[in-house]
Amino acid sequence: MNGDGRQRKGYENYIKNTKTKSTERKISEDKIKEILDKVSLDEIKEIVSEFALENIEFRNKIFTRSTLKKDTGSDKNLYKQIIEESLCQGMDYHGFIDYRGSSRAVRGINELLMKADQMLEKGQIEQAILIFQTTIEETFPALLWADDSNGDLSGVINWSFERLHDCTPKIKNETTGKNFLDYCLLEVSSKSYENWSGWRWELIEIASRLIIKEETEIIFAKIDELLKKEQDQESFSNKYDKEKSSEVKLEIIERFNGRVEALKFINENLEYTPIRRVAIDRAINEKDYVRAKNLAKEGIELDTKHGWPGLVVEWKEFLYKIANKEKNIDEIRKYAKELFFEGRGFEYYDKLKNTFSAEEWKKEFQDFLNQLKKLAWGIVQPLVKYMLKKRGGTIY
């Protein structure tokens, strides 16, 4: 039997099996319905109760479904119990959640989060916030005794933070907003977040969107307090914290103090990557290409010293963008070639080539190829093969 025949046979078997399973399910449903029609409600409750006590997953579904039916009110203890029961489903005998068990561990949590999404859509903000908060609080510690390499546990935490961001602009009740702000400011100081800087900044960003102008100093003080704890550490984490703090502060200043104060803050904090990006983008938008180029070149110099090659390439991409805005062919060629050699994609090769006529490129290409050969052969070989194939077998 040839390949097509095997595929056809496999497809026929798949259809046959699907129909068989569907038929078997229908027969089972009919039998269950027939049995339930003959059983009293009290007997059904007894059966469900017994099975729930014996089966963790079924018990968790009962707890979750009972919560899903509530349109008002909230019970944090019940949410905690649902999450704890869900996590238990993924544990081994030693209480560890391995990468295979992590998907089981979040089933009940995902169902609870879907309920919170429904609450959010219905405008039940306080109830939704409580579920998202409880999910973060209860799932966070599980990361310490779990293999989360497939991202299931961190996924429900990220989902919860994303939805908490969504809740923020929908809060109309002043008390709810104040309570939420207080919660974020309290949680951000928790030791639980010491090794999870990204999630700590999620709380700061949420808090920054809950404040009024008179409360800006509260956020600034909290940010400075966090940075002070790590001021003596020269680490990537410390760099990340400083850069995130500058981003949040700029957003707050721009919102409450206006463009002039924001520009002053930008000029005083160009050492931070996000601020330099903003400064370059604004200069480009204002067609101040001289300033934009100077900022990008300063970035290259600084990050070359610091040993951050990825950022050096990013500043070169800005310079390439500016060269195109100015229609500066020499600069376009310079940065297109450098970015291609940096491995930023074959598009830069084509952009470089397109700045030459066919005759000019034949002369230019040999020099280009000589520079290319100076790179590791493991890189050069696939690049050359690609160029040959793309151009119909010719080296040009």
Image (tube, rainbow, N blue to C red):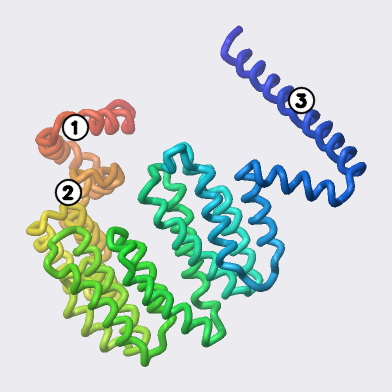
**Mark 1: amino acid:** Val
- Image location (x, y in percent) of residue 99: 43, 39
Question: Can you see residue 56?
Answer: yes
Q: Residues within 10 Å of mark 2 (few under 14, many from 20)?
A: some
User: Residue 323 shows which numbered tag?
Assistant: none
Q: Residues within 10 Å of mark 1 (few under 14, many from 20)?
A: some
Q: Are marks 1 and 3 in contact (CB under 8 Å)?
A: no
- Number of numbered discs: 3
Q: What residue is disc 2 on?
A: 338
The residue depicted at 71 percent of the width and 62 percent of the height is 69
Query: If the image is split into quadrants, where does the C terminus sit?
Result: top left
The answer to which quarter of the image holds residue 271 is bottom left
- Image location (x, y in percent) of residue 146: 39, 45
Q: Residue furthest top?
A: 1
**Label 1: element kind:** helix
Q: Residue furthest left?
A: 305
**Label 3: element kind:** helix
User: Residue 380 shows which numbered tag?
Assistant: 1
**Mark 3: amino acid:** Thr
The answer to which quarter of the image holds residue 191 is bottom left
The residue depicted at 33 percent of the width and 62 percent of the height is 192
Q: Mark 1 or mark 3: which comes first in sequence?
A: 3
Eye-nearest disc, 3 or 2: 3
Q: Residues within 10 Å of mark 3 (few under 14, many from 20)?
A: few
Q: Mark 1 or mark 2: which comes first in sequence?
A: 2
The residue depicted at 80 percent of the width and 29 percent of the height is 23
- Image location (x, y in percent) of residue 349: 25, 43
Q: Mark 3 or mark 2: which comes first in sequence?
A: 3
Q: What residue is disc 3 on?
A: 20
